[in-house]
Image (cartoon, helix red, strand yellow):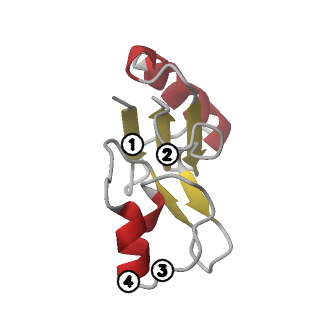
C-alpha cells in the first residue's frame, strides 16, 4: 500500500522557500517509507506539495508518482493509492488520449 502526503497552504502561513518545503515534506514522507519501499516522488510549489511513497505493482519502470502533466496551461499532478482493475476498459470507453505510462492510475487524470 502506497503512502501519500499532501500539503496546501492557501493563506500563506508557511514562510519557507519551495526548496525548504520540499525537504520538510520529504522528511515527513520518509516516515511512511514502509508503506511504499519501491520509490518516492514529489511535485510542489511555494505553498503546496504532493509526496508519494510507492509500492510498485503496476508498471514498476514507468509508473512513478506523482504522475505529472506539465504541458498544459495549468499543470495536473496525481498521486493515488489502490489498483484500478479496469483501467484499460476505461481508456477505451471514454476514448482517452494515449497514456504516457503503464500506470493504472493515469486514466484518473
Residue highlighted by disc 2: 49
Image quadrant where one finds the N terminus: top left
Instruction: Please give the residue where the numbered disc 1 appears in the rendered image.
Output: 6
Callout 2 touching callout 4 (CB < 8 Å): no
Classed neighbour count for the residue bearing mark 3: other residues with Cα under 10 Å, few (<14), some (14–19), many (≥20)? few
The 10 Å Cα crowd at callout 2, few under 14, some 14 to 19, many 20 or more, is some
Proximity of marks 4 and 3: CB atoms separated by less than 8 Å = yes
Q: Which of pointers 2 and 4 lies earlier in the amino acid sequence?
A: 2
Image mark for residue 96: 3
Sooner in the amino-acid sequence: mark 2 or mark 3: 2
Label 4 vs 1, first from the N-terminus? 1
Q: Is residue 109 visible?
A: no
Image coords of residue 51 (percent x, y): 49, 38
Q: Is residue 60 left or right of residue 32?
A: right
In the image, 89 versus 73, the foreground residue is: 89
Compare marks 3 and 1 and give the one earlier in the sequence. Answer: 1
Q: How far is the residue under mark 4 from the one under mark 1? A: 28 Å
The mark closer to the camera, 3 or 1, is: 3
For the residues labelled 2 and 3, say whether their Cβ atoms are less than 8 Å apart: no
Q: Earlier in the sequence, mark 1 or mark 2?
A: 1
Q: Which residue is drawn at 62% across and 80% down?
A: 73
Residue occupied by mark 4: 94
Front tag of 2 and 3: 3
Q: Are marks 3 and 1 in contact (CB under 8 Å)?
A: no
**Circle 3 SS class:** loop
Q: Is mark 2 on a helix, strand or loop?
A: strand
Marks 2 and 4, how far apart in space?
Answer: 30 Å
Amino acid at each position: 500500500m502506497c503512502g501519500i502526503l499532501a500539503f496546501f497552504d492557501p493563506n500563506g502561513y508557511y514562510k519557507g522557500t519551495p526548496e525548504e518545503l520540499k525537504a520538510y515534506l520529504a522528511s515527513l514522507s520518509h516516515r511512511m517509507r514502509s508503506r511504499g519501499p519501491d520509490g518516492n516522488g514529489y511535485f510542489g510549489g511555494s505553498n503546496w506539495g504532493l509526496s508519494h511513497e510507492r509500492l510498485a505493482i503496476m508498471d514498476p519502470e514507468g509508473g512513478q508518482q506523482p504522475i505529472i502533466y506539465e504541458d498544459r496551461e495549468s499543470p495536473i499532478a496525481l498521486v493515488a493509492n489502490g489498483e484500478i482493475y479496469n483501467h484499460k476498459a476505461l481508456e477505451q470507453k471514454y476514448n482517452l488520449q494515449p497514456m504516457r505510462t503503464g500506470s493504472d492510475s493515469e486514466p484518473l487524470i
